[in-house]
Amino acid sequence: FTGAFYALSYNTRIDQDNTLALLPTGTLILSVTKDTYEELGLQGQPSQYTGRKPLQYVIKLQLTEPTMAPGRKCYERAVWALSEKVPLRFDVLVSWQPPEGKAATAPAKFFAEWDCREVRADVTVRPVAARACPALDSLSLQPEDGAACGAQDFFDWLGAVSCDIDCSSDNSASMRCPEPSLPMGPSLLCSITGLIRPDIVIQLLSALRRYFEEPKLACWATLTAHGFADSPVSWASLEHGFHKGGENLQTLLAFANGNYWLLRAVGTNDGCPS
């Protein structure tokens, strides 16, 4: 392949099963149970989230290194361990980004000998009724004078709205719109679910920027990217663990004046780059 190739095991649980991720750098990451690790015999490290008695191990194979070329000892050992000694089988989501200027080709054509089918991203658009929204100052993440809401309060409110929680209800006092607030007209929430490559996220971000090239009534717009809860890897190739919810997401808040906020949320068992 040329371009950037991505693969991620599907319907596997990071804290109980064997999981897999292949990065465009050529790094194959396996998060495996203790029993699988001992049977494989491949070098790895205990998961940093399993405590004093590790139950999960992380194996990283750099497939682009010369030692992993077909016929070399390391390559043959890895193939034997993964295909014969402990045959690991996964349902895998794959996607690839073609080189610039090249037409995209569906990855399925390269995997004809396996059960492979094309899966399109699920796109939904939902109207959001007019409601109160937090008043924001794009120059201050945490205003001290109370004239605007802070980033954390806004992030919580945005999550509630995204989950279709009625923030005006008396039964959800903790999710009420923080003060000070402003009236917000009807808006749209668009969700895209699937294995979304970084280049697609960048295209969506560019569209968000172009939205404010001409005057708009809206003061801001957001783009949120959720990582897979059971992926063995998080940002900057750091290890990802599940803990309670497997959260790893980031939101870019774009203001009409050209300023931006980047908000990140991760679970306890997750690496977050500075």
Image (spheres, grey):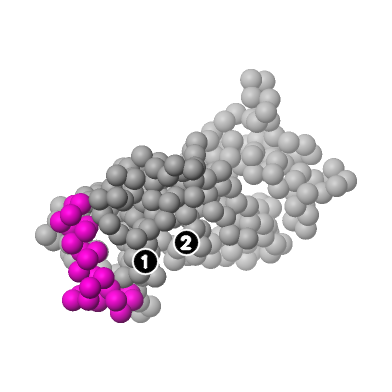
Q: Which quadrant of the figure has residue 146?
A: top right
Using residue 8 as the reference point, say whether residue 265 is left or right of it: right
- Mark nearer the N terminus (2 vs 1): 1
Using residue 167 as the reference point, say whether residue 2 is left or right of it: left
Q: Amino acid at mark 1?
A: Thr
Dot 2 and dot 1 residues touching (CB under 8 Å) = yes
In this figure, which residue is indicated by the disc labeled 1?
Answer: 27
The residue located at (52%, 45%) in the rendering is 269
Residue count near mark 2 (Cα–Cα under 10 Å), binned few <14, some 14–19, many ≥20: some
| Residue 59 at least partly seen | yes
Q: Which quadrant of the rendered structure holds the N terminus?
A: bottom left
* Residue 250 percent location from the top left of the image: 56, 52
In this figure, which residue is indicated by the disc labeled 2?
Answer: 237
Using residue 236 as the reference point, say whether residue 10 is left or right of it: left
The magenta stretch is: 64-87
The residue located at (18%, 62%) in the rendering is 80
The answer to if 161 sits in the magenta stretch is no
Residue count near mark 1 (Cα–Cα under 10 Å), binned few <14, some 14–19, many ≥20: some
Q: Is residue 253 above or below residue 67?
A: above
Give the mark count. 2
Q: Which quadrant of the rendered structure holds the C terminus?
A: bottom right
**Gap in Å between the C-alphas at discs 2 and 1?**
9 Å
Question: 47 or 183, which lies in front?
Answer: 47
Residue farthest along the right direction in this orientation:
145
Question: 206 or 270, which lies in front?
Answer: 270
Any mark on residue 106, and which? Answer: none
SS for callout 1: strand
Question: 192 or 34, which lies in front?
Answer: 34
* Residue 128 percent location from the top left of the image: 55, 38
